[in-house]
Image (tube, rainbow, N blue to C red):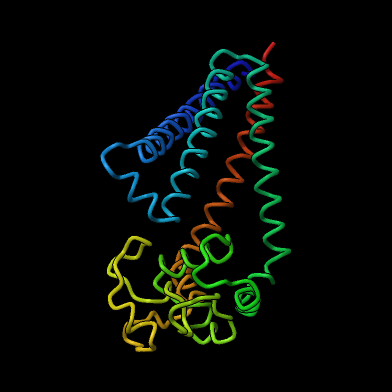
Amino acid sequence: MEGDCLSCMKYLMFLFNFFIFLGGACLLGVGIWVIVDPTGFREIVAANPLLFTGAYIMLAMGAMLFLLGFLGCCGAIRENKCLLLFFFMFILLIFLAELSAAILAFIFRENLTREFFTKELKKHYLRNNDTDVFSSTWNSVMITFACCGVNGPEDFEAVPHLPHSSLESVIPEACCQRELQSREGKFVNKEACLTGIERFQNRQGCYTVILNSFETYVYLAGALAIGVLAIELFAMIFAMCLFRGIQ
């Protein structure tokens, strides 16, 4: 009976890890294709910071799942204690990293308030100075989400202008409406926007826009995170049971 249970656990673990292996291979393939594609898709991704970051996250996740699935499959089907131990340690590290990230997110959740972002924007933002990482990131966010400031254009009334600026506009260029929401997108009417004509400006604050964009995914992400942690926990238990059962 014990041998039958061990055999059943071995093949279940192999099947489970085979699907992880296939998923990792698919993500890895798509990530590599997006980054090295010579047909012009790479330029589209590079123009959008979110897509560009997403492509590398996809590549990293694909590589991690590919390796994880490979270790699990080989360890289960070959009944190799060394591979099973590597599989267990790999999942344990991922599990602890995810748990640490969740705890840190809970501890520092008060730093994600509207007031915190408004204060940081007014203190560090340098308008169109893209050599500054903070300003460049904010400009990319405002262009991508078609928003302006944290609460709206009024956030920039206290932000000083750059030296030798040609237009003494309250809002930066990133708040002006574009035909395409990317840095390469043409302005609808840049001069009118910077002179204060509101219909050519993005008037909504980024905090509300981003919150609304991700609100529908919060519960899904939470449920998914709990599911992933549960699967990882069971995978570690299965790996250790199989490890102990191998003679």
Q: Nearer the viewer, residue 14 or 165?
A: 165
Which image quadrant: the C terminus?
top right
Callout count: 0
Q: State the image quarter where residue 105 is shown.
A: bottom right
User: Does 3 appear above or below 88?
Assistant: above
Q: Nearer the viewer, residue 81 or 99?
A: 99
- The single residue placed furthest to the top in the displayed view is 247
User: Does 133 appear above or below 14?
Assistant: below
Q: Nearer the viewer, residue 142 or 245?
A: 142
Q: State the image quarter where residue 198 is shown.
A: bottom left
Q: State the image quarter where residue 3 is shown.
A: top right
Q: Is residue 45 left or right of residue 234?
A: left
* Residue at x 67%, y 67% (from the top left corner): 109
Which image quadrant: the N terminus?
top right
* Residue at x 52%, y 73% (from the top left corner): 127
* Residue at x 69%, y 49% (from the top left corner): 99
* Residue at x 29%, y 67% (from the top left corner): 186
Q: Nearer the viewer, residue 167 or 223?
A: 167
- Residue 22 at x, y percent in the picture: 42, 30
- The single residue placed furthest to the right in the displayed view is 107
- Residue 207 at x, y percent in the picture: 52, 75
Q: Is residue 39 left or right of residue 142?
A: left
